[in-house]
Image (cartoon, rainbow, N blue to C red):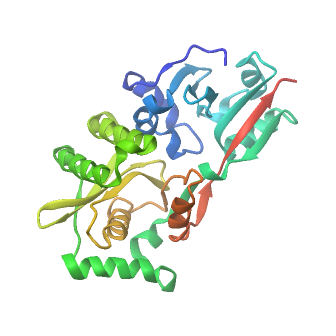
Amino acid sequence: MDKNFTPVSLDGSRDFYDLWQRTPRRSLDYTLPNLWGWQDYYGLEWCFDDNLCWIRQTRPRLVCWAPVGDWNAVDWSRVLPDSFSEAAHDFVRVPKELLHVWQRALPGLVDAEEDRGQWEYLYTQEDLATLPGKRFHKKKNHFNSYVKTYGEPDYRSLDDAMVEDVLAVQDDWCQWHECEDSPSLRAENEAINRVLSHWDRFSGLDGGSLYVDGQMVAFSVGEKLDDLSLGVHYEKGLNGFRGVYQTINREFARHAGEGFTYINRAQDLDEEGLRQAKMTYLPADFLRKYKARVRKA
């Protein structure tokens, strides 16, 4: 792409947030904590041009993501072909809504392929907060086991002073799961440490935690995506505490999710075990994303 890209940095946060607020469909992928947290792993870069924030990854291969900004205020028939010199250009993680805008602006020139592993799971806040009926019987049993063993959840909203406890839980989790032996888990650990160590630099981050006998045993960190949706960035629990994941999931939805219609719990990256786990919570919908190839006329 013929643009002047630079590494994603917090120095550009004001310009980014201005465009982010105007983006019609806000994916968890495109939040600043996600872009900056994973900047090193994916070699993420951005460029502010055409009233858009263009984004690309340079590792493990060079490919563009979707741009951030007011998609409906752009002359895509001019801007998109002018942004690259080759005959065709590939994009990944393109939200369905932007894909349709491109296809209307450039009829017959935008090919698309469904990318199921990048679809973000959307659950109703009410379902996650209440676990209603027989559909969630097993989840409710795990929650009840937690309450029976440890008492009513001691849920606390996160603040700057609690970041040290959060990172201690993350460190314990990483040791148990041997993060150093997994490039993806190691990268996630680095992203979590990086973002939480700069908690106050991000707009809209929210978090919650569970304590048992004065010890933090689980945490969840999320972010307001729009007026309807809360996204979940990270969720971890200590090994050995039965029902801890079902409980932090429920309590975070109850407290941080209050007032939202949907909870966005990210994609499964085509990992079968993760997909099965996400499906057990019965998603109401997905934020669908595609691979797209844009050709010149």
Q: Up-down: is 177 above or below 141?
A: above
The answer to whether 76 appears left or right of 195 in the picture is: right
Q: Up-down: is 234 above or below 41?
A: below
Q: Nearer the viewer, residue 97 or 279?
A: 279
Residue name at image x 65 percent, y 51 percent:
288
Q: Nearer the viewer, residue 127 or 17?
A: 127
Q: Position of residue 211 (x, y in %)?
A: 19, 63
Residue 15: tell me if it is visible. Answer: yes
Q: Position of residue 29 (x, y in %)?
A: 52, 42
- Find the residue positioned furthest to the front: 181
Q: Position of residue 49 (x, y in %)?
A: 59, 19
Residue name at image x 30 percent, y 55 percent:
176
- Find the residue positioned furthest to the left: 214
State which quarter of the image contains the N terminus: top right
Residue 39 sits in quarter: top left
State which quarter of the image contains the C terminus: top right
Residue 111 sits in quarter: top right
Number of numbered labels in the structure image: 0
Residue 8 sits in quarter: top left
Residue name at image x 43 percent, y 29 percent:
40
Q: Up-down: is 49 above or below 44?
A: above
Residue 204: tell me if it is visible. Answer: no
